[in-house]
Image: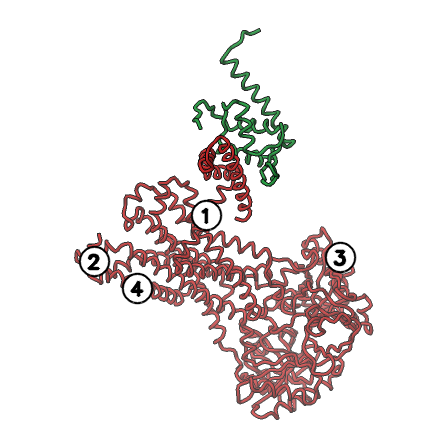
């Protein structure tokens, strides 16, 4: 080492000086220079030993031994490149995958939210007994106002909602940008200081003074090129001019509309954009009643230091009782039993139910690492046996026991370190890939990146890998009895029976892990197939969808919106190749929304909670939904107050008799039922079909409108035409997104598809590892048993018998592992049952399939070694004895 | 070069003490220290280089002596590694000296027991 070299040179110099002096003295005594030098040398003694003694006094001896062994291990690995390469790649893949997954788990679940003292940030929900059980929902603004005034547990409370806005800079069509609309105190509650400019003033919450906006850092960089003079510029957001007053720092991450939903539904909005711009919310309390308007806002609050969530919740509940008591009599709802509140840590809300899936992923990947290490251990064990002789010689020459163990462990350390290094590089690449391919509803995706904690985790994994794969062979060598080993021939090393059983155990463990993984994968695949192939009630092929945001500025009045809708529908129907077109107020497969009560007018006790949708004629035909009774919307329904109910609602309200012609009441208005549509899973594939009620769009033309077009060709071809048709009469309309309905279907199952594909990849990798393991062990075994096979064959065993011999050797561990794995996975399946659809934990067909797959793989892996064993020439073997 | 069979084997600790004492007289390099000990004891103690240099480096590591390469010799062209006593070394020497005296007194009492007075 370089620091040693200096000292070594110094010592050399010192000793040489001494030598010269000695020689000079002897010369003076009368010897010739030559003799003098030799005499001096003899007087100094053994130079090497002197140097060694000095070195020992430096205390480097132990370190040198360690390094020397490492170098030696490196050379040995270099000689068996095949082993080194496969082992290195296996470890690199396993450690890389584990690191990548752990990064995600850490960034999404474990790391606290990126705000000052984020532990104090909470979300406050209202709980209303009437709407679908006791579900938590965002508060009514009036209630939230009371909370702000009376809840001393909070140091601040802000209301937030997320919308998509069209941002227009100069010419061109507006582009969609994630907009966070919040009460002006949001940044104070979050304790975030703007990077440039300023935050909101309380004034900005007043109508007329709210035409301001704050940019997030990514938006500032991408759309404004990081221009420092951006403060004061005006932009048009959803057709409203706003002045930019500030820019947020790069470290600011606000959860997108998926992660922070005001309504706890199981479905996520596809393509919820990352928040790009912040605008103040003008909440005019006079526009809201005391009852209703729930679920539109999310209440984020900061607890006072020292106040617990339990205390805050208790306080809110007391306040809620007060609100219920003081509610004006005319607004009170007799169906209300109680109005309560709950408080949740903000991090919990944001992370939500992605937690289980991610932990599952981490477990799977760590299992894979374990399998890789077991494989490695097995391979090492094989190599160890052939190095027993070397270890015996070392031991006989006086090597300390730790030295022998370290010798063997050094190889594992080198492999693991190299593997870890390559693994981290792979992890970085995988994370980049992950960001593109990740399920769209994964919260905090923007915050996923490598950090010190993850690198520590990686290092820890490396150490674990070293220990698991190297410790057994190393300890084995440490216990070597030199005499016994040296006396035997290399082919019949001592302890072979013991090591064979050890290898059998390792194989068994591998099979066990692999079986569990494959079974879980099988269950997930079955669940996904079930979701995809169940009867939906509508058809998605060849349908294109365009989501449009009608800005409140130009389209404030309903007639303007109706005119726009009419024009677009006319244009769409005029497109070549279009069979039908329609519009709806909510994107399908994005959960339930617009939840209202619906009653029969003549028998008000018959009522139901329904999802309300505004549609145009042609919608049901485009979606190919089934007509059960009556008719769908036609042009004449524009001026009639007509309603179409879904089958389950119709049955609930009219248990006997036909609903057609009956009157229903919702949102304070009365409608006539003209038709009944079959139940369909239009809100989510993962739940029961929802209760729906449809009205003509003229009744309340929506601001966010979704146009559907069914064509004769594949839907992708239609999309460009659809955009043109929309912009034809209104070029400054924001088209939020366009996609095919098939794509929407796939996206709604994104999480399940992701989980399943990852599991399949891991399952296949595990299977490959197990096969390699079996192959390796059997190969080694046949190689060492050559003599035994030769003798057996000489004594009359046939090739078939030898085949059987080899297969039987593998059969025991494989069989045991398979059985144990099946049992364990039945237990594991219970844990993941809630992630499965239409599949129970105990699924015999899947079990049999997995077992069959594994047996086939095991037989394939065992085949080559078996053949090699059977083709041993007994004469040749016996002669070599 | 007579093999001096009278050479007394020096214990490691004792050699350390002798080196420190030698250096108390002034800085010296390894060869000089060995020669000094040899001369002063009339060849009775001949320090083997195999013991001297490890001892010197050990003392240096314990910071009782410090080392520096300095030019010396007839025409200041050659350099030698000179060792000096440090302040800590001086203290250590005092300690070892008193230990040595106590030990020799104890041994003397056993070998030549004096009348108790």
How far apart are the two marked residues, 4 and 3, measured between alpha carbons?
72 Å
Under tag 1, what secondary structure? Answer: helix
Q: Residues within 10 Å of mark 3 (few under 14, many from 20)?
A: some
> Which numbered disc flags the more N-terminal residue, 1 or 3?
1
Marks 1 and 4 on same chain: yes
Tell me the residue that label 1 is attached to: A68
Of the pair A769 and B68, the residue shown nearer to us: B68
Tell me the residue that label 4 is attached to: A864
Colour of chain B, in one word, is green
Mark 4 or 3: in front is: 4
How far apart are the two marked residues, 1 and 3, measured between alpha carbons?
63 Å
> Which numbered disc flags the more N-terminal residue, 2 or 1?
1
Tell me the residue that label 3 is attached to: A155
Marks 1 and 3 on same chain: yes
Residue A402 at x, y percent in the picture: 43, 42
Q: Which disc is residue A876 wearing?
A: 2
Chain of the residue displaying label 4: A
Q: Residues within 10 Å of mark 1 (few under 14, many from 20)?
A: some
> Which numbered disc flags the more N-terminal residue, 2 or 3?
3
Q: Is residue A624 visible?
A: yes
How far apart are the two marked residues, 2 and 3, measured between alpha carbons?
89 Å
Residue A873 at x, y percent in the picture: 21, 60
Marks 2 and 1 on same chain: yes
Vertical relation: A594 (above or below) B83: below
> Which numbered disc flags the more N-terminal residue, 4 or 2?
4
Under tag 2, what secondary structure? Answer: helix
Q: Mark 2 touching mark 3, by CB under 8 A?
A: no
């Amino acid at each position: 080492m370089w620091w040693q070299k200096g000292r070594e040179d110094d010592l050399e110099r010192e000793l040489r000086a001494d030598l010269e002096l000695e020689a000079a003295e002897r010369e003076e005594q009368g010897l010739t220079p030559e003799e003098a030098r030799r005499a001096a040398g003899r007087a100094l003694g053994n130079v090497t030993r002197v140097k060694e003694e000095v070195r020992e006094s430096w205390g480097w001896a132990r370190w040198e031994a360690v390094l020397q062994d490492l170098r030696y291990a490196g050379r040995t690995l270099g000689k068996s490149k095949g082993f080194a390469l496969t082992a290195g790649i296996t470890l690199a893949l396993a450690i890389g995958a584990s690191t990548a997954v752990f990064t995600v788990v850490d960034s999404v679940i474990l790391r606290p939210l990126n705000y000052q003292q984020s532990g104090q940030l909470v979300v406050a929900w209202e709980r209303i007994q009437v709407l679908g059980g006791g579900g938590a929902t965002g508060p009514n603004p009036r209630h939230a106002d009371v909370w702000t005034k009376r809840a001393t547990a909070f140091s601040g409370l802000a209301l937030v909602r997320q919308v998509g806005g069209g941002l227009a800079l100069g010419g061109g069509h507006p582009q969609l940008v994630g907009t966070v609309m919040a009460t002006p105190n949001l940044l104070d509650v979050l304790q975030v200081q703007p990077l440039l400019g300023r935050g909101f003033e309380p004034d900005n919450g007043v109508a007329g003074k709210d035409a301001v906006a704050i940019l997030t850092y990514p938006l500032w960089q991408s759309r404004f090129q990081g221009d420092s003079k951006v403060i004061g510029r005006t932009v048009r957001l959803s057709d409203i001019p706003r002045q930019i007053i500030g820019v947020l720092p790069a470290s600011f991450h606000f959860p997108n509309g998926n992660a922070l939903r005001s309504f706890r539904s199981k479905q996520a909005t596809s393509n919820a954009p990352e928040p790009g711009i912040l605008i103040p919310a003008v909440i005019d309390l006079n526009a809201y009643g005391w009852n209703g308007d729930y679920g539109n806002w999310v209440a984020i609050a900061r607890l006072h230091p020292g106040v617990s969530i339990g205390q805050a919740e208790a306080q809110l509940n007391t306040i809620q009782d007060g609100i219920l008591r003081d509610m004006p009599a005319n607004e009170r709802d007799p169906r209300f039993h109680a109005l309560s509140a709950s408080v949740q840590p903000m991090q919990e809300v944001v992370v939500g139910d992605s937690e289980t899936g991610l932990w599952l992923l981490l477990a799977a990947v760590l299992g894979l690492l374990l399998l890789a290490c077991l494989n490695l251990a097995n391979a090492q064990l094989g190599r160890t046996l052939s190095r027993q002789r070397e270890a015996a010689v070392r031991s006989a020459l006086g090597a300390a026991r730790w030295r022998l163990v370290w010798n063997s462990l050094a190889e594992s350390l080198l492999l693991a370190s190299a593997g870890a290094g390559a693994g981290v590089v792979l992890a970085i690449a995988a994370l980049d890939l992950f960001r593109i391919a990740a399920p769209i509803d994964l919260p905090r995706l923007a915050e996923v990146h490598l950090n010190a904690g993850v690198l520590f985790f990686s290092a820890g994994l490396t150490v674990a890998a070293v220990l698991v794969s190297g410790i057994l062979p190393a300890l084995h060598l440490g216990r070597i009895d030199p005499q016994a080993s040296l006396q035997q021939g290399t082919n019949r090393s001592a302890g072979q029976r013991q090591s064979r059983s050890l290898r059998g155990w390792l194989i068994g463990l591998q099979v066990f892990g692999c079986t569990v993984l494959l079974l879980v994968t099988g269950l997930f695949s079955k669940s996904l197939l079930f979701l995809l192939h169940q009867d939906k009630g509508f058809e998605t092929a060849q349908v294109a969808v365009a989501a449009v945001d009608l800005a409140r500025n130009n389209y404030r009045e309903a007639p303007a919106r109706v005119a726009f809708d009419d024009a677009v529908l006319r244009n769409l129907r005029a497109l070549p190749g279009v069979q039908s077109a329609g519009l709806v107020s909510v994107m399908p497969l994005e959960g339930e929304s617009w939840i209202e009560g619906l009653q029969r007018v003549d028998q008000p006790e018959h009522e139901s909670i329904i999802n309300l949708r505004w549609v145009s004629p042609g919608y049901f035909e485009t979606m190919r939904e089934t007509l059960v009774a009556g008719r769908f919307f036609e042009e004449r329904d524009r001026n009639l107050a007509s309603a179409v109910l879904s089958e389950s609602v119709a049955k609930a309200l009219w248990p006997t008799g036909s609903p057609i012609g009956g009157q229903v009441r919702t949102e304070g208005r009365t409608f006539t039922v003209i038709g009944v549509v079959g139940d369909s899973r239009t809100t989510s594939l993962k739940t029961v079909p929802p209760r729906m009620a449809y009205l003509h769009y003229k009744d309340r033309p929506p601001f966010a409108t979704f146009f559907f077009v069914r064509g004769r060709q594949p839907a992708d071809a239609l999309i460009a035409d659809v955009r043109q048709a929309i912009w034809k009469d209104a070029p400054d309309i924001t088209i939020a997104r366009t996609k095919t309905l098939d794509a929407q279907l796939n996206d709604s199952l994104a999480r399940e598809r992701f989980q399943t594909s990852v599991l399949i990849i891991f399952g296949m990798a595990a299977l490959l590892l197990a096969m390699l393991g079996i192959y390796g062990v059997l190969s080694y075994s046949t190689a060492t048993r050559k003599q035994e096979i030769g003798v057996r064959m000489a004594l009359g065993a046939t090739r078939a018998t030898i085949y059987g011999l080899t297969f039987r050797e593998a059969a025991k561990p494989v069989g045991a592992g398979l059985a144990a794995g099946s049992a364990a996975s039945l237990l594991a399946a219970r844990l993941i049952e809630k992630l499965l659809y239409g599949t129970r934990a105990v699924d015999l067909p899947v079990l049999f399939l997995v077992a069959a797959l594994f047996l086939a793989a095991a037989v394939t892996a065992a085949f080559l070694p078996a053949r090699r064993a059977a083709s041993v020439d007994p004469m040749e073997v016996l002669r070599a004895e | 070069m007579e093999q001096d069979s009278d050479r007394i084997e020096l214990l490691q600790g004792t050699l350390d003490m002798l080196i420190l004492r030698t250096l108390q007289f002034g800085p010296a390099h390894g060869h000089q220290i060995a020669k000094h000990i040899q001369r002063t004891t009339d060849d009775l103690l001949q320090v083997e280089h195999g013991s001297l240099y490890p001892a010197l480096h050990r003392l240096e590591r314990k910071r009782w002596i410090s080392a520096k390469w300095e030019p010396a010799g007839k025409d200041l062209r050659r350099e030698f590694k000179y060792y000096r006593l440090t302040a800590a070394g001086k203290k250590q020497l005092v300690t070892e000296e008193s230990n040595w005296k106590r030990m020799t007194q104890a041994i003397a009492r056993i070998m030549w027991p004096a009348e108790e007075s």
